[in-house]
Amino acid sequence: MFRALARVGATESVAYRTEVVVWLLSTTMPLVMIAFYSAVARDGPVGGFDQARFVAYFLATFVVRSLTGSFVSRQINLEVRDGTLAARLLRPVHPLLAYAAESVGALPVRVAVAVPVALGMLATLGEGALARGAAAWLAFFASLVGAWLLSLLVSFAVGALSLFMDWSDKVMDAWLAGLFVFSGYTIPVELFPARLRAIVEWLPFRYQIGLPAELLTGAHAPAVALELLARQWLFVALAGLAVRALWRRGVGRFAAYGG
Amino acid sequence: MIAARHLSKYYEVQSRPPGLAAALGALFHRTFETVRAVDDVSFEIAAGERVGLLGPNGAGKTTTLKLLAGLLHPTSGEVTVAGQEPKKRDDAFLKSVTLVLGQKQQLLWDLPPAETFELNRILYDVPRARYDATLRELTLLLDIDLVARRPTRQLSLGERMKCELAAALIHRPKVLFLDEPTLGLDVAMQVTLRGFVKKYSETTGATLVLTSHYMDDVVALCPRVILVGKGKLVYDGALDALARRVRPDKHVVLRFSRPVARVDLERLGAIVRHDDAEAVLRVDPARVHEAFARALAELPLLDLTIENPPIEEVISEVFATGNPDGGAP
């Protein structure tokens, strides 16, 4: 069942060529950041980041964002507004599983973008720019799965808010604003002032993008990596609980508008 | 197969007068009113029955249908469909029912309907051999062999509706909920869909609950009707019995070879419509024979037919008078 839904997701993800191109363009923020921080670090390292490290870090965020981004909230919002959520609710499969499978189905297109970037990174910056050792790579893949799940669950939870309010898309906009600032997507978390960083480490945003990018570039010692991974999966569990509560209550309120 | 007992669904909706001041006031103090979309409705539908759920706009018929399908949770009362409680949406329930909403779609928009058919085969766990046989039959009956291979977004409304029906029936549900399935379709397509639904119901023994504004759909498909108005059940019974009770009179349709004076027609019955070529008279059933004989003897007739009043008039009269027993309440 999951495979069939994923296949649909894969087929849909390539149905519009223009949409694929637009999506590609929307993921290029890290490349802009590379240009920006390369200029900033031209005269010397900034907070431990030299030009090469900036390039490696933002290429890593590009890979992570490409593989873990989720647009489920927009989809749910649309389906609640136009009533097509009704068709989804009448299928013998939980909508979260269906959205997850469709999201997995879209991965091949994303991998086709991310893998060449990762290989290019390896070729230009050398192996020293990446994590070293099986344990480090294992930690990276665990954080990547955690980031994907966290993004999916957060997006699903915000989408489920559409069952309570008309403007859940604005909630997602606010979340994305937080994500862009505090996740390490535009500013590496390491560069935040100590006090702000202490707060950011207990916000979920970093665990959606920053942590996997940091682990891919070998930024943390094993003990720190494990602690951060534990925090990430704690946020995954909390997001799971939020989804469960919101969905159960929200579906009971579904008005199946129109018709 | 379907039982609803004291079923109610209320909504709280915001209420405020128009204007900027009222809009600003609503920021601080909101007032709500309760809309009783379905109000203490009870009925039972046996396996294999075909029932029309009728009523004016906002009567609560689509809400009732969505309660039966498990999309909405009742405010109070109980409902069971195929032995299940719809709002739980257990797999066993979802695999035994289907809901087709004329204005909504389950087909994957960017992909050909064939992809939705295949997806539904897997989701509903339909054995391959049965799926192939069902799909062959649906494709033949609905003539969708070619259109099922084109992206849904490129299909006409009629083609899409036929594919929607096919997608909804892939798992051979025991209960069909159809909400305005012929809305917006041309007459020929309406006839095709009606014929198909009737045949499906007769051959599989499926139970059908239909809402439609097209009385032709109801007359063709539903021997029994449930009338709802302002959320309440107004009538539950046979359609022809309702027609006989509310409008026992007959319509005598006369076509003339030359114009006939109005006064000559008034002797036969009440004039519903009259022009140089044709007239429609409303005649008491006890006087139909007499009117028939006098018309043949006295009028320059080309043709004469005796019909029941249109069902639209019957339904309109029930809702106008609020009395399904005929006459004023």
Image (tube, coloured by chain):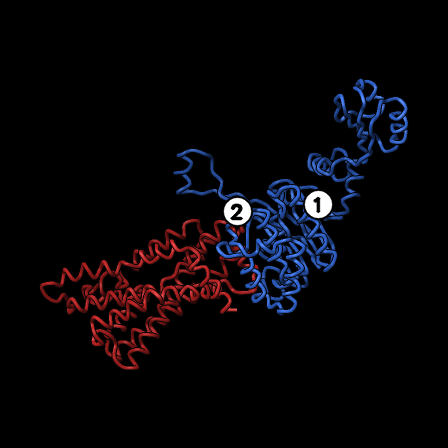
Chain colours: A red, B blue
Looking at the image, can residue A202 be seen?
no
Residue B22 lies left or right of residue B141; in this view the side is left
With respect to residue A120, does B54 lie above or below? above
| Amino acid at circle 1 | Val
Mark closest to the chain's N terminus, 1 or 2 = 2
Which mark, by number, is residue B218? 1
Q: Residue at x 59, y 49 (%)?
A: B159
Instruction: Identify the element where label 1 is drawn.
Output: helix
Residue B58 lies left or right of residue A99; in this view the side is right
Q: Picture quarter containing residue A108?
A: bottom left
With respect to residue B248, does A88 lie above or below? below
Disc 1/disc 2 C-alpha distance (Å): 32 Å
Residue A249 position in % (x across, y down) = 49, 59
Q: Nearer the viewer, mark 1 or mark 2?
A: 1
What chain does mark 1 sit on? B
Q: Residue at x 90, y 31 (%)?
A: B289
Front in this rendered view, residue A192 or A149: A149
Q: Residues within 10 Å of mark 1 (few under 14, many from 20)?
A: many
Residue A76 lies left or right of residue B48; in this view the side is left
Return the residue at label 2.
B12
Q: Residue at x 73, y 46 (%)?
A: B220
Residue B304 position in % (x across, y down) = 83, 30
Q: Residue at x 33, y 54 (%)?
A: A174
| Amino acid at circle 2 | Glu
Residue B300 position in % (x across, y down) = 84, 22
